[in-house]
Image (cartoon, grey):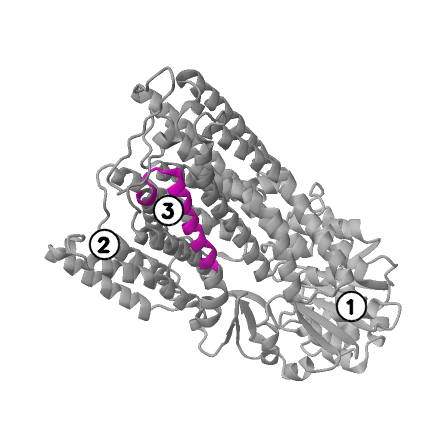
Amino acid sequence: MSAGTSPAVVATSSSATPCEASPSRTTRSMGWYFLLFVGSGFCSILYELIWLRLAMAQFGVTTALVSMVLSMFMAGLGLGSWASGRLIRRLGSGSRLSPLRVYALLELFIACSAVAVPLELRWGRRLLEQLGNWVPLPSSSYHLAAGLGLAFALIPWCACMGATIPVAMSAIRMDHRLQSQRSFSFLYLANVLGAIAGATVPLLLIEIWGFKGTLQAGMFVNLTLFAAALALSMRQEGTDGASGSVDSKTVFPAQPGNPRIECLVLLFATGMSSMGMEVVWTRQFTPYLGTFVYSFALILALYLGATFLGSSIYRAWSRRRSREDGLVWFALWLVALFPLFTADPEIGLSNFVRVLGIVPFSGLMGFVTPMLVDRWSDGDPDQAGSGYAVNIGGCILGPLLAGFVLLPLMGEHRAVQVLAVPWLVVGVVSMSRAGLSRVHDSLSWRIACYVLCLAAVVVIFDTHSFEQQYPRGHVLRDSTATVLAEGEGMERRLYVNGVSITFLTPATKMMSALPLALLDHAPQNALVVCFGMGTTHRSMLSWGIDSTAVELDPSVPRLFWFFHADGNELLHSARSHVVIDDGRRFLERTAGQYDVIAVDPPPPTQAAASSLLYSREFYSIVKQRLRAHGIFQQWVADDGDVAAQAAIARSLKESFRYVRAFGSVPRYGYHLVASDSPIPNRSAAELARRLPVAAAADLVEWGPSSNAEQQFAEVLKQEVPLDGIIAKAPSVPALRDDQPVNEYYLLRQLHLSAY
């Protein structure tokens, strides 16, 4: 069936013939469908964001885990879209289950996922723990087992989400009053509008209610959609007779021919390119937006907002035209390159204006994606389901290609260019076909194309990436991050994805010296979570004990030599053990016991997912890995967020029997030391005497004091009561996995929070 033809849609019954409804009735009916899909889009993004975070808490904050969760989510959407298009035909003549009622049941099932998925994720982790007790699981086997668990936990519910569009298209097509040729783009538009709200509103709800309460809000919306769809189906039955009297062969006539295969190829390419670009953008704009949950939310909201605008333009355009100009595809290549210009650090733009560079490409994607599905399906839910599933297949491949191939091999700048190339090819092919482009007939259009091509060449060859600001820096790339080490002497810094993570400071040496010197016994070993420059790990080794350092990014330890001349030698020491893993997941899986565990999460305190290393649940894991009378050390930045500091302090107080807090040297942040055994109240001289000679020399290597006793004295005189930190925000709750106070802070900044 060609895109320009319309099938005869006839609803028949044994006692009545269809009649035309008034335009107002048709508008009201379509309005109901629009509202249903606004709510559906809101819930789907809400669940995606929260499920991803809950999965991190259960299985670790690793790139592989994030990729698996997103892939399972998209795979479920694609499977549901494809299968529902096939199954909806089986309702057939005489079925009492109308498409609207099927849609209502789908929303009811999706509502159940708000309760079921968190339970399934917890069960999955417990099962993995038991499996690990029987058979040691290397990282690859662990990820495979976790992937299977995520598949069982997520795919069935996501399939219900993916099934909603074909089922609703079927309902629209069976209702003889409604026009259905462009029903996919209509529902897609509503879904994207809801997704915009789903990418922003939950961030405020999480700050107030936590993850559990926000999931319950999503469940309430799903139940409302269930009730509304059920009521709408009953009203339509009362108006038009039972929908089961509709003959599916009449409503879905046989297609006279298959739509062109090019539609499916382009649908796959749009999914791959758009989602691949989203992964690259997240890393490309991190130097300007930071590592906050709101940074990703801004990118996602702009992407969805532009998609909505593009889809709206397509809806208006398609009423007057049936075929796009070949310039659309050529323009897609040009605007895909635009973020190279706005992300150039040598171009003076505000951070918000920089990220607006993604809008033109996202808008054009919002135009072409529903256009292709409409053209492929012509309103047929079966065809739409398969077309949308192909698009989602590209959405699965795109992030994997970008995250595991393009970014590690070539970085953000080149990755954007590679992901844009397919649209240059499609644009050239489209414009070369006679009659498809006005470029053949207009000199002004040809000149415009030449100028735009010249601009594209300039953008490709004369723009700069973040790391090009540091020509003497050392850059390493992997699937987790782009890591940059630069500077000289004490000015050396470590950047991860363009964000300054740490610098050379005596505070990182005190993270090892203070807890080790406070022990009431001779230490045997220690654990450092978050390697950074390796300073704390190096200081642990200066005590002549075994030190294990856990680092999420494999490239970070490879730069140990840049910050410490003896770095390579220490990495190969028999007492040095570096593990590439999520720190929390390592603690859950290891059977080791440690005298000291030191944790220094990457700054800032508000960084996304950092609460998983500050929460009560994390501290309960730490306690299991501390040897009797062992000490835990947590450094907390004094960055002005007193609510986050109070939440962390309260979390420690509720987790350990004894907690002491000391100001850092230099005076920025706090060393919090905690134990279930009394922490000795030693003087600076007593602490200094407990240090081995090498450890004492290491402690004062960078000053500010000339000997260990003076260095300890500076810290001891800055001891503050833990309750004093809590009193800065007395109403704030303890930081928990469900209530990540430090990460969600917008309402506090706007003075709209209760604490």
Disc 3 from disc 2: Cα separation: 19 Å
Q: Specify whether 294 is left or right of 507.
A: left
The residue located at (48%, 40%) in the rendering is 163
Instruction: Report the magenta residues as a range.
Output: 375-399
Q: Are marks 2 and 1 in contact (CB under 8 Å)?
A: no
Disc 3 from disc 1: Cα separation: 52 Å
Q: Residues within 10 Å of mark 3 (few under 14, many from 20)?
A: many
Residue for badge 1: 514
Q: Residue 552's image quarter?
A: bottom right
Residue 689 picture location, percent across and down? 85, 76
On screen, residue 27 above or below 584: above
The residue located at (20%, 57%) in the rendering is 431
Residue for badge 2: 327
Residue 527 picture location, percent across and down? 74, 68
Q: Amino acid at mark 3?
A: Ala
Q: Residue 528's image quarter?
A: bottom right
